[in-house]
Image (cartoon, rainbow, N blue to C red):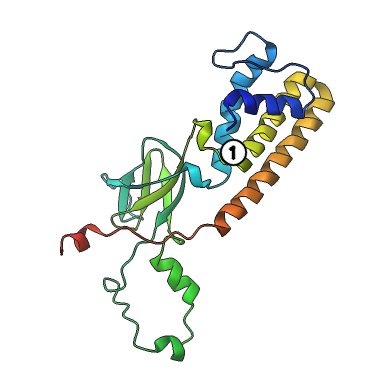
Amino acid sequence: MASVVDICNIGLSHIGAEGQVASIDPPDGSVEAGLCARFYPLARKELLDDQSWSFAKRRAVLAEVANTSTVWAYAYALPSNILSALRVLRLKYINDASLLWPAGSYLTYSFDWQAVDELFTERGSALFEIEGDVLRTNEPEATLLYTVDVTDTTKFSPKFVSALGMLVAGYLAGPIIKGTDGASIGAKWRQAAYDMSASAAASDANSSNEMATHVAEHVRARS
């Protein structure tokens, strides 16, 4: 798997830089290493935040905190390692919602079954908002699916490595090439990175089939 140094050197190669780096933590003393040490962490976090990468997804049952809102029913503390929130899982239960479908009703009524499916699986999301380190929602016993900042490059997918090398190139082009050429080349590689990121996300979504596994506390208490 590619290392941090490998990814930085990929970025340098994209913009035709003559120098390569041997270390960025600490920097090896070269100008390129100093720039990579500055921009690589920014590029990594930016790309992780751009899509819901499978290797960076985590979930947590949120801890409820004092709720000062008159709009939202519940307030929760965000996980300490969160980079970005993806969705609050809508893990409703048919019995609790009094939605016991009559036998054969799917044949006689034109329900929006995709909406029903999203309501009772993890593909849908409850409405929420984040203020500071507090998440507010109307979902009880909220479980949050979110992205973390993954620094271990052995966890990166191949397309993430490719996209990250391109985004690093986008950051490095300006200070290394300079002028309008540097800005133009940097913009080209940033666009290429986001095109690759979007392609990877689409592929990732097509291979995902997450189903609800969480059991509410009051349901567990019955058993």
Q: In the picture shown, does residue 169 fall above or below 214? A: above
Residue at 37% across, 61% down: 212
Q: In the picture shown, does residue 60 fall above or below 120? A: above
Q: Which amino acid does label 1 sit on?
A: Leu
Identity of the residue furthest to the right in this view: 181
> How many discs appear?
1
Quadrant in the rendering for residue 48:
top right
91 displayed left or right of 24: left
Q: Quadrant of the image for the C terminus?
A: bottom left
Identity of the residue furthest to the left in this view: 222
Q: In the picture shown, does residue 207 fall above or below 106? A: above
Whole-percent x, y for residue 58 in the image = 41, 45
Whole-percent x, y for residue 221 in the image = 16, 60
Label 1 CA crowd tier, 10 Å (few <14, some 14–19, many 20+) = some
Quadrant in the rendering for residue 32:
top right
* Residue designated by label 1: 47
Q: Quadrant of the image for the N terminus?
A: top right
Q: In the picture shown, does residue 59 fall above or below 41? A: below
Identity of the residue furthest to the front in this view: 1
79 displayed left or right of 7: left
Please tell me which residue lies in front, 163 or 120.
Answer: 163
Q: Is mark 1 on a helix, strand or loop?
A: helix
Whole-percent x, y for residue 61 in the image = 31, 49
Residue at 70% across, 28% down: 11
Whole-percent x, y for residue 166 in the image = 69, 34
